[in-house]
Amino acid sequence: MGTNEKASVLIVDDEEMVITSVRAYLQLETDYEIHGFTQPEQAIKHMESNQVDIAVSDYLMPKISGIQFLARAKQLQPEASRVLLTGHADKQSAIQAINDVGLYQYVEKPWENAQLLLIIQNGIERAKLLRELREKVSELDTAHSSLKNVQKRLLQAFL
Amino acid sequence: MDEEPRPEQLWSEAVDLRAKVASLTAQLTEEHKMASIGRLLAGIVHEINSPIGAILSNNQVIIRSLEMVGKAIAGGDAAALEKAGRIVETCQSLVAIDKIACERISEVVRGLKTFARVDSSDLRKVDLNEHLQNTLKLTHGEFHRRIQVETDFGDLPPVECHAQMLNQVFLNILVNAGQAIEGEGKIAVRTRREGDDVEVSISDTGRGIKPEDRSKILAGGFTTKAVGVGTGLGLAISKKIVEETHGGSLSFESEVGVGTTFHIRIPIEQVKTAAS
């Protein structure tokens, strides 16, 4: 995957109004590809077959909570950054989220657009870097094992 | 020197004590009301924060968009104008969202207002269905992600009552119902006129009340809830408000594992008595 590909932002909130507002703002300020879902189940489906750079999720949702969703997101795409955007005035949920799903950021509603944008930009950057790192590591692994091969053959040739 | 107190003196002490008990009871009732609201606060805050977030964000987007549209109009070329048209469409959808968001906030505030402290001696004729609806708005944040609330409101005449106090009773029983339900469930609220009374029934599909607890739950100081969750006073206060203040009745039926229904019966007209 090339780095010139458009960044993909996933927004999950059971309130349509939050998705619409964040989408309108991001469309105005960025050229990101934005996918909004009112049901976490659909967002999970989306992540199963599409690369996501950052997932922004509400906390309190019916059936699947934001933390459960982000935990699943982590399994599916560990490099994607995870952000909890919540109106729940509950520090315990924040701590749990940070511990359980390795949250990238915790944002409280009502959110500040400029702050949210900065978090999303940095989160995308982070995801891209992590993916690049993984690619480099695997390239390094391949190079290392082919080097080993060459070494082995050299040794065989001389011994 | 031990002197036997005179009967008049004893009498006046008794009157003082009675007044003190009445004022303490009123204070306790008020404090309990605030505690019930406090317990719902996280849900109420959550309910308000999403629409406020949306409005704030939309406001910024609309300001920026208007600037862009203004420039496009001034520039006047066809491509810019076409883009301006799309921006205007986005703004229209955001304005529509702002309206919904404001309505949502107003609903919650209306619910809270029914609990604002007013003179509790205020006896008025009210539409109990409307009051129930407003009280339900307060539980919405707490309930709507796991509990389905069904209302079946009958035609009710205006009921003469202390509406704030009855709202407290409804909230109490609704909060209890919500706490009785583990995971997902249903709460049904039904109102009917029954002769000279009005009956409000609140049913839940919760865990039910154990037979051995049934005789205790309407008495004060009994709770099966964890420390910090229940005070053990909610139903005792509710019973007092319904039966002593309004001359009505509070009863319930319950089946373990199936659910509980509370019946609140209030006379449509209060009997005028000399007692205060």
Image (cartoon, coloured by chain):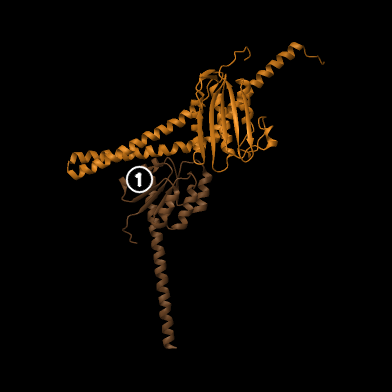
Chain colours: A brown, B orange
User: Is residue B129 something that shows in the picture?
Assistant: yes
Is A81 left or right of B160, judged from the image as shown?
left
Is B259 left or right of B43, judged from the image as shown?
right
Image location of residue A61, percent across then percent down:
47, 44
**Which residue is situated farthest in the left direction here?**
B77
Q: Secondary structure at mark 1?
A: helix
Q: Nearer the viewer, residue B105 or B21?
A: B105
Is A86 left or right of A30, judged from the image as shown?
right
User: Is residue B35 something that shows in the picture?
Assistant: no
Q: Residue B60 is drawn in which quadrant? A: top left
Query: Label 1 sits on what residue type?
Result: Arg
Q: Which residue is mark 1?
A: A23
Image location of residue B136, percent across then percent down:
50, 32
Q: Nearer the viewer, residue B262 or B120?
A: B262
Location of the N terminus of chain B (image quadrant)? top right
User: How many numbered badges does the structure rendering display?
Assistant: 1
Location of the C terminus of chain B (image quadrant)? top right
